Structures are given as C-alpha cells and as structure tokens.
Image (cartoon, rainbow, N blue to C red):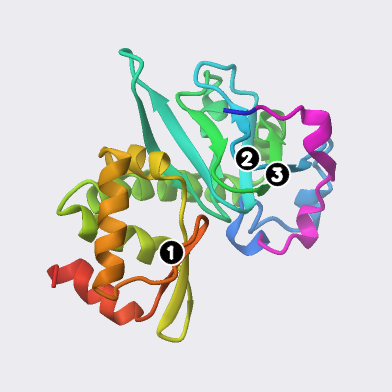
Amino acid sequence: MKTIEIKNAWRDNSDCNACSIRSSALFAELNEEDFSKIHSPIDDMRFEANASLYTQGDVAEYLYTLREGYIKLLHINSDGSNRIVRLVMPGDLFGMEALLGQTYSHSAAALSNVHLCRIPKAIISSLGEESPRLHRQIVKKWGEALAQSESWFSEINTGRIKIRLARFFLRVARVSGDMAVAPLFKREDMGLMMDVKFETISRALSSMSEQGLISNISRLSIQIPSVNGLRKFSQSGS
C-alpha cells in the first residue's frame, strides 16, 4: 500500500456546519452551541487510490468520516493472510477504536480517490461529556458499523459467487431509474472481500456480462442495465 504524506493530503480545517454530507455524518445532530465548543482542528483531507490511512496496530488517535470515495478496512491475520472486513462508504464513520483508547484493529486504505475528515479523539471525548446529541450520534454510528459488518459478511460470503457479486453491486450502486452504475475495484481487492481468488472474480464478471446482468465493464465501474433484474437474480439466482 502506498502512503501519502499527511502534509500533502491535508487541505484545510473542515467546516462541519456547512458539510454537504452533514446529515449522514457524525455531527448530524449538533447545533451551533455544540460547534462553538470544538477547539481542536478537524482536518479536511484527500488521498489518492491505494493510499494507506493507518495500519493495524497503530495507536488510534483519530476517527474518520468519509465524504467521497471508498475505503477498505483490512484485517491481517496471525498467519500473514489478509481479509477485507468492511467497505467504508460516504457518510460512514470508521476508526472508532480511538474512542476506547486502543490501537487500530485493522488497516485502512483507499480503494479510490477519497475525501475525508480526520477527527481528533479529544474532540469526541470533550464534546461527548457535554453534548447528549453527540453521544446519541456516536452510539448510532457505532451500531450502524456493527450492523453493516454483519450484513456484509452475510451478503457477500454466502451463496454462489455471481449472487454475491450481484448483492455487492446493488449495495454500492448509484441508481438512476432502473439503471445504475457501480464501482469496480481491483480484482485482488474483490477477491479479498469475498474470500475467493481474483481469477474467480474475473470469470464471474464475464459470465454476468454474457447474461446481461451487467455491462460496460471497465477498470473502475460496471453498468447495471436493470436494477430490478439484478435484484431478482440476487434473490433467486436465475
């Protein structure tokens, strides 16, 4: 994984009050009085695809909210093997181990170019004591992350590989009417998500294209000609 120097990634202090994804981010329920209590800077940062944000075992000093792009959370097993345990999407909170004063239990790396906010845990600790709104939002986001992780394993690790890919594309697709576009990551990353070899991913994508379930496969995306058709396939396999 490629690491980008923080000074090159840092853009400015983030204006949380005017954030376009505030309604889905950590500070959604905060009011003007709450924002006035934030004294440490929240960093507005951009990273290129493949950049490493932090590594498993690093001291957890920050939480992160993703604004644009996709991030993989990668767990390194004792035998040296890797497994992607969660896909972080815009509006998601990650790095929550920082709230427990622990080290990060996974590594985080950009699957695409990303735009995120890096939040010092000191802000959360101080605001959490004074703002019931923030405490509720933290509990909500933590619950969402746990639910997402559970459904992630259930959806993309059970069933035939084409059905698992269909579920994955439906989860991440940007829908317009009955058509949609879904991001496509490196075959190796897709394999790590679904615990299969990357050659298996390639063969499954080709087969789905022949069936008309997906089209216009490129390095970065696929098109879904019929969302309803792909959803039906994901449920019945036919």
Q: Position of residue 236 (x, y in %)?
A: 13, 70
Is there a contact, CB below 8 Å, between mark 3 and mark 2? yes
In primary-sequence order, the first of circles 3 and 2 is 2
On screen, residue 213 above or below 198 = below
Q: Which residue is mark 2?
A: 64
Q: Nearer the viewer, residue 234 or 225?
A: 225
**Whether residue 117 is situated above or below residue 58 in the rendered picture:** below
Q: Which mark is residue 217?
A: 1
Q: Which residues are magenta?
A: 3-21
Query: Secondary structure under badge 2?
Result: strand
Q: Residues within 10 Å of mark 2 (few under 14, many from 20)?
A: many
Question: What residue is shown at x 45% (from left), y 46% (from top)?
Answer: 87
Residue 70 position within the rendered picture, expressed as x and y whole percent measured from the top left: 54, 49
> What crowding class fits label 1: few (fewer than 14 Cα within 10 Å), some (14-19), or many (20 or more)?
some
Residue assigned mark 3:
117
Whether residue 46 is situated above or below residue 19 in the rendered picture: above
Could you tell which of marks 2 and 1 lies nearer the N-terminus?
Answer: 2
Q: Earlier in the sequence, mark 1 or mark 3?
A: 3
Residue toward you, 194 or 13: 194
Task: Check the picture and name the quadrant holding the N terminus.
Answer: top right
Task: Report which quarter residue 83 is drawn in.
Answer: top left
Residue lying furthest top: 78
Callout 1 secondary element: loop
Q: Position of residue 10 (x, y in %)?
A: 81, 38
**Amino acid at the residue labelled 2:** Tyr
Hey, what amino acid is under mark 3? Cys
Query: Mark 1 or mark 3, which is nearer to you?
Result: 1
Q: Is residue 60 left or right of residue 153?
A: right
